[in-house]
Image: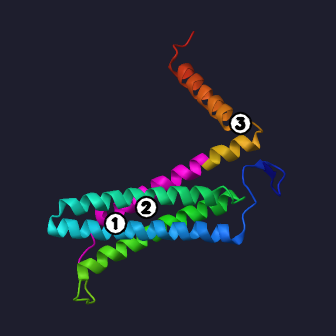
Amino acid sequence: MLSSSSGAAVSHYSDWSAINWAVGYLLLGIAAGVATFAVSMWIVAARDSAGGMSAWAFALGIVAGGIQVHALWALVRHIEQLGWAIALALLVVVVIATLTYQTVRADLTGQDATYYTPPVPARAWGIPTGVSAVLAIGVLVVDGIHRAAAALSMGVGLFILVVLSFGVWAILSATAPSSR
């Protein structure tokens, strides 16, 4: 546990070299590429009614999500300021949204690329974007729990136990009949 510039303890690690950062960002790029390829496979499966290909597209989507969670978690653990970690997570979601949207749009225009493009179905790019956002939020919540526990000088398990105990107490107090 290292000390930040403000004096509060945080759970970040500063032992990464430039190659570690490069590999982490490369993995995020690979996750975005795999998600985009999965969307391409999904489009082809929907157009050609290829059931096996849609299963592969789903499997690739799961792989992309796994890579994103692993890489984002590794990077966020090494970022001292929470704001930069949030910015990185937001950037990942925006990149995946942009790439998947452009992939669907390119398929809709096909070889006849004109000024007019038919409306892009929201589910074609919204589902990968939403899943990416949920995964990024999950990573940030877990990282926030680690940072809060480190700032309070207690273990993560104890911190979660204290928060859950307070939640149970609050629910029981709110639902208890008043003693007037």
Q: Earlier in the sequence, mark 2 or mark 3?
A: 2
Circles 1 and 2, Cβ within 8 Å, touching? The answer is: yes
Does the magenta run of residues contain 43? no
Q: At x 62% / y 61%, what residue is drawn?
A: 75
Q: Give me the C-alpha separation between circle 2 and circle 3.
A: 31 Å
Residue 153's quadrant in the figure? top right
Where in the figure is residue 4, as x and y percent of width and height? Answer: 80, 55
Q: Which mark is residue 64?
A: 2
* Position of residue 106 in the picture relative to residue 180 (left or right): left
Q: Secondary structure at mark 3?
A: loop
Does the magenta run of residues contain 133? yes
Most frequent secondary structure within the magenta stretch: helix
Along the line of sight, the residue nearer the viewer: 173 or 5? 5
Identified by mark 3, the residue type is Gly
Q: Give me the C-alpha separation between circle 1 and circle 2.
A: 8 Å
User: Dot 3, crowdedness within 10 Å: few (<14), some or many (≥20)?
Assistant: few
Where in the figure is residue 131, as x and y percent of width and height? Answer: 41, 56
Q: Which mark is residue 130?
A: none
Q: Which mark is residue 155?
A: 3
Q: Start and end of the magenta stretch? A: 118-142
Q: At x 62% / y 71%, what residue is drawn?
A: 22
